[in-house]
Amino acid sequence: MRKQQNYQWPEITLGTCYYPEHWERGLWAKDLERMLASGITTIRIGEFAWSKVEPEEGRFTYEFFDDFLAVVASTPMKVIFGTPTATPPAWLTNRYPEVLNCRIDGVKYQHGMRRHYNYNSPVYRKFCKRIVEKLGEHYAKHPNVVGWQIDNEINCETAEFYSDSDIAAFRKFLQRKYETLEKLNTAWGAVFWNQEYTDWEEIYVPRLTIHNSTNPHQMLDYIRFISDSAVSFCKMQSDILRKYVKPGDFITTNGMFQNMDNHRMTDEALDVYTYDSYPNFAYCLTEDPKHAANLNDRRWSNNLSQVRSVCPHFGIMEQQSGANGWNTRMEAPAPKPGQMMLWAMQSIAHGADFVSFFRWRTSVMGTEIYWHGILDYDNRDNRKLEEVRKIYKRVQTIKDLAGASYRAAFGIVQDYSNIWDSQVDVWHQRLVWSSEEEIFIASQIYHTPMDYVYLLEDTQVDELVEYPVLFYPHGLILSEQKAAVLKEYVEQGGCLILGARTGLKDETGKCVMTPMPGLLAEITGSDVKDFTFVGPADEEVLMEWNGQKMDTGIFHDILDTTGEEAMVLARYTSDYYKGRAALVENTFGKGKVLHFGGTFTRENVKAFLAYAGILEPWNALLDVPEGCEIGIREKGGKNWIFVLNYMNKEQEITLKAAGIDLDTEERVQGRVRLSAYETKVYQIDIAL
């Protein structure tokens, strides 16, 4: 059972990321004054400023941040202090090159970027412990400091580590896990291609190979090792800070990135989780603008749903306020008028109770000179600052919703073993990436909000039964524990929808010699008789369900029934398996399982949602077009209804029930026109 988060913001508040070391001291007081006048009440500082406190090895000076915090102390501004371990100083990397991470071929990364260290260097850990101890001891007691951010974007830039320290740590990780080489060789299938190990010193992190192909079972353990190392690094810092943090203050870090068990990290090291939200991050000028303009910033709702699974009431440490870009990569347009409000409301609609804009002023130097902030280089008031003021005005009307829960109609089941396996198995990857994106798109355009629901080692059925419907798109890796909790969910009345290739593998990533769906066969009442990818030249294969023909995706399991309660709902319409079962329903306990042999598309997901009786749950309240998103948060019987227009043109919505427009405080009903990128927040008088 997930533990309750240790910290929640008492009301919706705004912040910004600020770097006093980048600006003349004469700007500090003026900047703080302008921030406060615009509704910004929290700043994050320090996460890249190690040398400001330890300019030489062992020589500590607190003068710089003491001076800055003295300016802050004359204001009500709150401060989140970052530990500076993402950018070790030059004296450290030059004198102790063993702290540097390496490429897969063993070549060291050099100073001049960020996140070029490795988590497992004993030398680096020693210096990190010391700087965190010094910072916590000196600054945690400051009355304006209310929180601490550990490192910055753990596993960003790279989530792979190949240093000598990582090799040594990987061996220890494996010895703890397997105890004997015999068990390791079995788990890794090391007999294949003569990879059996006879000494722990023969084992390395993945190395350069022909075609860069690797043992997939070794890779799974390597990813688990990276996650374990990163969590350990974060917890090391958290344990130190807890000696100094004042009651009521919090410890966080900002994510989320690959090869990381964010749930475990949050449970073991953090009080609250924060995320960096850049909704047009990937909309660079080299990409397909048609695809990006229609979906890209809306896609961030999918990311925010992932964050919500880790921490239901999270914060945004970096909310996009300008174009993204480095001098070496990424060229992007500035946000259009209204998009900053749209993105901030997107975050809040999905569970954020704190939104901090990156950054206050665009840097005039360094790699991120094109990563634009609220203010531009010229430091003048601009339309983005004016939009921040509008966001603050909106926030004042909804500040009491802090702690309100996001209301989802269904859940998508995930687990880290399958996420990580899909990174090393291209067959798995193609299925799961396609299906999860299509389920998300269906959730958005058919206005049926979703959550991600993780199967962790301690997940209990109580965490699942709040969802009447769960999709487990392609759970190739199954364990007895995961199968048991899913069985209990169905027994208690849940509807579980499975996709192709369910139950193919065990936790090591090896294929099992039992028919799919493996450990779930008892509750599916089905059997996979054959399977195939859909080839590029193949005739389109549909399934016929209730008299309708619909797409079955890119992969097909050919099914059969095995249980007395099982029945075929749909059959394939063509190819060599024409007429064979594509969809089987089985009653089990109080619930049912739909075993679908294909991959998910927005059209067939709509059919599944309708069949389960949960399609468009808010249709009685309001009607909105596909270009808009609906998000609802609830607390104490009170609902806040967000409508977000992602389109660059006007959209019309219809309020079917009377409600209060929280911007105007007017009661409204009927047709409402939303301009390009406009958002609305309503309270409607009907209990949901």
Image: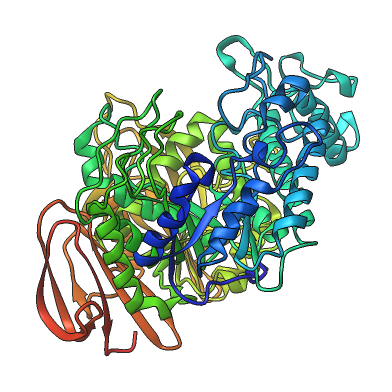
Q: Position of residue 20 (x, y in %)?
A: 52, 46
Residue that appears at 59% across and 18% down: 213
Residue that appears at 14% across and 84% down: 668
| Image height of 87 relative to 8, above or below | above
Residue that appears at 81% across and 22% down: 203
Horizontal placement of 224 versus 679: left or right?
Answer: right
Instruction: Residue 118: name its quadrant.
Output: top right
| Image height of 607 relative to 600, above or below | below
Residue farthest toward the front in the current orientation of the protein: 26
Q: Position of residue 604 (x, y in %)?
A: 30, 53
Residue that appears at 50% across and 61% down: 315
Q: Quadrant of the C terminus?
A: bottom left
Horizontal placement of 255 versus 84: left or right?
Answer: left
| Image height of 640 relative to 204, above or below | below
Q: Position of residue 370 (x, y in %)?
A: 35, 33
Residue farthest toward the top in the current orientation of the protein: 210
Whether residue 151 is visible here, answered yes or no, is yes
Q: Quadrant of the N terminus?
A: bottom right
Instruction: Residue 541: name its quadrant.
Output: top left
Question: Who is closer to the viewer here, 539 or 101?
Answer: 101
| Image height of 127 relative to 648, above or below | above
Horizontal placement of 616 versus 531: left or right?
Answer: left
